[in-house]
Image (cartoon, rainbow, N blue to C red):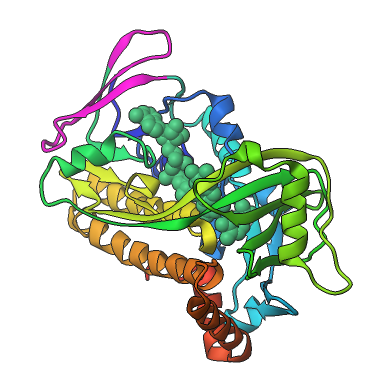
Amino acid sequence: MRTQVGIIGGGPAGLLLSRLLALQGVDSVVLENRSREYVEGRIRAGILEQHSVDTLVAAGVGDRLRREGLEHSGIHLQWPGTRATLDFPALCGRTVWVYGQTEVVKDLVAAQLAGGPPLLFGVSDVVPEDVDTDSPRIRFTDADGAPQVLGCDVVAGTDGFHGVSRGLVAGGGGQQVFERTYPYAWLGILADAAPSTDELIYAWHPDGFALYSMRSPTVSRLYVQVDPAERIEDWSDERIWDALDTRLALEGWSVNRGPVLEKSILPMRSFVSTPMRRGRLFLAGDAAHIVPPTGAKGLNLAIADVTRLATALVRLLQDKQTDLADAYSDAALARVWRCTHFSWWMTSMLHRSGDEFDARLQLAQLERVCSSEPAARELAENYTGLPVEA
Ligand code: FAD
Ligand code: DHB
């Protein structure tokens, strides 16, 4: 087997990269170690920045997003007794869209299987080789158990946080890892309940942070801050709804309850591995960096990485120019650090540490964001997504 770009990982980053390359006439093969059902069912992010929406629409996978996605023009920030609203178009001229990562992935898989580049599910033992040469290879075992070798010009490591690619980049020397583990986790539920809010609510509360989000006019997605040591078995649906009622409480308003479709606990960390390239192996998305979910940045950052990488690879493989490929890691990392800072800042402002001094600082910061236009604009610009060139 031979292709121009061998893509390891069929998450949003790998699938979108393959699509963007195909639109520019560059061949690729996507190798995914899980099944289609698993990849399409994995519940994760829910908010798309303006540039992510623009990229998906331009890539021809935005029809359902435009039909079924919910355009949101702001968020509510809350603390006991107060619910303030930030108006994004007024503050920065942009909006965001509620459209689940599951739906983004389904749209990308459907486009790929309808005449797009090969997408192989259920592969195993994926090993990139010779990435320091101009003709790297990927060894793997296909879904039928047969050993295969995929020869390529470039390997893209879009295999997420637990993939094989980052370790190989580290083996090239000069790797640096920057990491912060937070003493918080999110317990998230997906519920068959119409959201009782127009915009998402990010709530500070003495008991801990809560977030009211949604997936559609009939499905809510809600989160509460818990200790990372908590076990999901100890959180009955009733206990979760009660915690949400307490933390999101506002006079004359209530959370709509309904059957809980899914619940899980996710840890929170910041992680950046540099550089994002070794020879002909390029990293993008969670393979290179993780942010805590509070700023809704993880999926958007993966989309920004591959948008930049696709342009660089087209230039490398079609025009034989190395400038954009050489600039890729530093340019991508500039955005990664901006988003890492924003996600850390949102996380720090909204989660209870148990310390009363911290609490007063957080409330002072929230008051400032909701009363000062420049402070609100700073949040709005970051939340809705800075331009990809940034
Ligand atoms: P992934 O989506 O992880 O895709 C990587 C793919 O590579 C996977 O399909 C994996 O199966 C495959 N793979 C791994 N190893 C191999 C291998 N060796 N060979 C072949 N294939 C391999 N972000 C937000 O903005 N908001 C949220 O609410 C949010 N919630 C999240 C909840 C959870 C539980 C997690 C884990 C992440 C969440 N994120 C959230 C982050 C967001 O989902 C990720 O940033 C996004 O999925 C990154 O896309 P990706 O394609 O880089 O990586
Ligand atoms: C969702 C997740 C986030 O991390 C966030 O900041 C907003 C929304 C969500 O899953 O809907």
Q: Quadrant of the C terminus?
A: bottom left
| Residue sitting nearer the eye, 102 or 316 | 102
Is 65 left or right of 140, judged from the image as shown?
right
Q: Which sits in the foreground, 279 or 165?
A: 165
In the depicted structure, whether residue 388 falls above or below residue 87: above
Q: What is the number of callouts on the image?
A: 0
Relative to 254, say whether 7 is above or below: above
Q: Which residue is at 71% across, 54% downward?
A: 214
Image coordinates for residue 6, horizontal then vertical, percent: 31, 32
User: Measured from the top left, where is residue 143 in percent x and y?
Assistant: 43, 13
Camera sees residue 111: yes
Residue 243 colored magenta?
no
**What residue appears at the point 43 percent right and 26 percent down from the top-left corner?**
118
Q: Measuring from the top left, give residue 308's x and y in whole percent.
A: 35, 56
Q: Please identify the quadrant where the N terminus is shown.
A: top left
Does any portion of residue 58 appear in the rendered image? no
Judge whether residue 143 is colored magenta: yes
Name the residue at 48% across, 48% down. Answer: 267
Horizontal and vertical percent for residue 345? 45, 71
Left or right: residue 193 compared with residue 342: right
Q: Quadrant of residue 70?
A: bottom right
In this view, 36 is above or below 274: above
Range shown magenta? 123-148
Between residue 178 and residue 300, name the one nearer to us: 178
